[in-house]
Image (tube, rainbow, N blue to C red):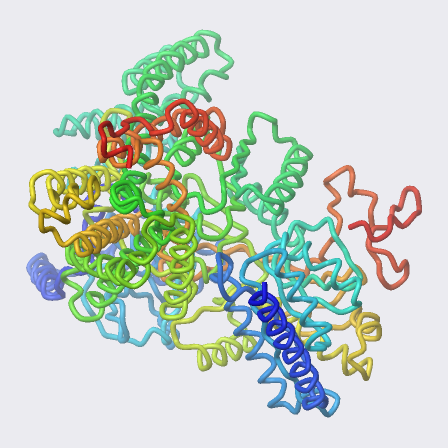
Amino acid sequence: MNFTRRKLTAALAGAAFAVSSFASVATAQEDTIKVGILHSLSGTMAISETTLKDVMEMLVDEQNAKGGRLGKKLEAVVVDPASDWPLFAEKARELITGDGVDVVFGCWTSVSRKSVLPVFEELNSILFYPVQYEGEESQRNVFYTGAAPNQQAIPAVDYLMEEEGVERWVLAGTDYVYPRTTNKILEAYLKDKGVAEEDIMINYTPFGHSDWQTIVADIKAFGSAGKKTAVVSTINGDANVPFYKELGNQGIEASDIPVVAFSVGEEELAGLDTAPLVGHLAAWNYFQSVDTPENAEFIKAWKARMGEDRVTNDPMEAHYIGFNMWVKAVEKAGTTDADAVIDALPGIETPNLTGGVSTMLPNHHITKPVLIGEIQADGQFEVVSETEDLVPGDAWSDFLPESKPLKSDWVELKCGNYNTETEKCLGSSS
Amino acid sequence: MPASPFPYDNPLDAPDRPMRLILLLSGLMALFMAVTGPVRADETELRAVIAKFAEAKKFSDTEAVIEEIVSLGDTAAVTALNELSEGRLMVRDSDGEVFIIKGGKDPLALLDPITLEQVGTAAESELSKIKIKNSIRRMIADAVSGLTLRAKDAHIRMEAAETIFSRPDPEIIETLDGVIAEEQDTGVRQAFIEARAAAVLSSDMSDDAKIDAIDILNARGGRDVLPILTTASTSDAAAVAEAAKTAIASVEERLMFWSAGQNIWYGISLGSVLLLAAIGLAITFGVMGVINMAHGEMVMLGAYTTFVVQEFIRNSAPGLFDYSLAIALPLAFLVSGAAGLVMERGIIRFLYGRPLETLLATWGVSLVLQQAVRTIFGPTNREVGNPSWMSGSFEIGELLITTNRLWIVVFSLVVFAILLLVLKRTRFGLQMRAVTQNRPMASSMGIATPWVDAFTFALGSGIAGIAGVALSQIDNVSPNLGQGYIIDSFMVVVFGGVGNLWGTLVGALTLGVANKFLEPYAGAVLAKIFILVFIILFIQKRPRGLFALKGRSVES
């Protein structure tokens, strides 16, 4: 008993020390603008998110080299939520209240974003979310710089329909919220376009699925019905490598059954021999191979910092755009105060890396071009199709009956889910 | 990738064949041309058309140039077309000349697109690739098949026939009639006849000709004929539609039989992966009773050893790449075995008889190992290549067998047999069994029980490392590799019966086959859940698993 009490006192003292040291750090560095980075550096998602932490640190350093903002230096504060969804909320709270950051760049999976939403709303801070996602969300404190479904999934399907003449569709995904919602939207869209029920096959697999033999054989069988078939893949993370290996081994070539993926980028291909995959597709808003001066400069800086063999990818560009938008908004507002910056952000324009100028929209999504790329033998993508104009991100899909009447506008309506039929704002439920 | 080992009718087909051969061949070609006199008139024509690729800015321009090449009908264009399809036809930026490039590193060798003579070198930055996409690749394949119907190499003719079969064009029927009459090779002839049948069904020939064609396709069978027959079954002519429907039913009936075989094969293959993952655990957990949560990380260490070996070979001795796995095997065994030995001596030996603490401690070790690997090798996937003998697939009837899976099945059985021999036939195996069955008695017989424990644990971990070498061929090599296998491994060992290797074998194969028969009906997610539910129920009924150990040793 005595022992436990002693332990408890020691723990309390330790905690008190920790709090006081936090406070002293905060006072000592009062004159910096703090930028929180909330990306997993350990656990399953570290594979994708570590890169984003690195790119954020690079952007902060570059901004400091240009003289910081508002006469102050920027300071990156990195925490590791360790791919643990509840921990994301805890770490977000720690960043905002403990470290006093003015803005947070972070999250990858939708479930981690959902986990931090209430924290950002309660503490009224700003989150920039850089990954393509399923839409059906618009929150006042969050700015979505990744693609909404209409900036990735729908244009990819259009490309396959028009250019490749695809009539039969396999929607294959990992079993969680992003693939399920995206596939629901795609299914509604395809049926809208006159594709029959029996020409759509939907397949879900667990996270990290590694035995693809049956599913690839099923896809092959599904593809032998006399109609051009394609696979739309929302397969996530590690499961992609064995999937593509199995496709290659079973001899499914891109010219017969192309696979268009929404979660496979340069980073994922780095662990793979891409020679058997040449011609399979991916839809993104950015590819490393895009030939613009801005991109060349970005890649050069990245490689100089991280090493020659490192690649760039779409979520990195999203952070690039998001960070530059935030810097401009802070300049415009003249302060880093959350409310002022949130009001200043819509309408901010900043060049993206593909040669256009992206704009922050009132619904907290941005305009982006949609690029379709084919995998090359060197692990890069070659753009085979590009939208003429930038596509504005749509928070609420027009192809789902329940979200069709919804509209998000934080400038005029001050509402993320305004129902245009009942003319009511549904409030902060989502 | 083309399945045939001889994809092209030119010396470039083998990318790593010595340059000398090419020079020799081009020299011969030059000699040949010198003997036969001036350059053929149509070659200049072809050259002029190929040069137009330089101005093709849009995909539609490239398509137009290919069409023009096809209209010339010159077989000399085949190489250039194939290289275009592979992305090795490039334009020199300075003067807009078109070359085939050769070699992977700067400077690249420039070959003339028709004569294939080396005409110079250039840095990669001075060249731009002629862009293509899937539809152009298809167009090239069709064009090449049209031009290679009379190629000297039977493999190339075969491939041409297969291409026509997969995308039949009625206009080619007449040409095919001529080719079929000339063809000597019976296999290729048959392929041409089938390709012709496919083309007939997409033409507007007479109903009788179509019904004959349906019979030919029916005799061929297989999944490939279904798309063609399905299209034919919607024909306006009732007789044709009827014949097509009967043929589809007959083809599908034969496929049904094969699909059962296919499921069994997939099941065995999945079972062999489970066996590999679990067999090390069958020693550490099954025989020693240590709940080793770091087992998956031993597998991961083996996979990373493979990566390091391959990386070393890539940099210093590329010729040895096909042997990389054989080199990695003993190394992986040593690395994981050593890790196991350290773990047993450092942690586990203090925790014998305290399963809960062992579980927590080994779980901690697993996290430490994961993060260590993440820090050293980075969080991203590492590329472990398949040696050529582990790539591709072959068919037995309609049964498609991928080579890497076949090797893994063989490998897992070999590992199992060796382990069984070690346990039953060696002195170490005897001591190991003696210690685990009755420790005080073994000790009083003069066996150094602590060291037997340590080496038993090292053996189990080493086997896990070997499994990692095999699994690196089908899964991705990342710090999370082990996590995916730990649950499955425990499942197999518990189901098979703790302490019995045969139980692990039967358990792994049963679960694999059951999973693969459920998957087509229930989907991958539900199949996995069903299997888990089944095991829970099974353990209720038989707590000691399939093959329970009998005898007094069990009591202790």
Residue placed most toward the observer, A310 or B186: A310
Q: Is there any visible trace of residue B46 in the rendered image?
A: no
Say if B53 sits above or below B276 in the image. below
Task: Let me know if residue B336 appears in the view.
Answer: yes
Q: In x, y percent, where is residue A58?
A: 55, 79
Q: Nearer the viewer, residue B425 or B392?
A: B425
Q: In this view, does A310 lie above or below A144?
A: below
* Residue at image coords 39%, 21%: B201
The answer to whether residue B225 is left or right of residue A105 is left
Residue B15 position within the rendered picture, expressed as x and y whole percent measured from the top left: 21, 59
Residue furthest to the front in view is: A2
In the rendered structure, the answer to whether residue B434 lies left or right of residue B45 reads left
Q: Which residue is drawn at 41% across and 53% down?
A: B357
Q: Is residue B196 left or right of residue A355?
A: left
Q: Where in the figure is residue A308, as x and y percent of width and height?
A: 39, 76
Query: What number of labels is visible?
Result: 0
Could you tell me which residue is drawn at 38 percent across and 60 percent down?
B365
The part of the image, by quadrant, that contains residue B50 is bottom left
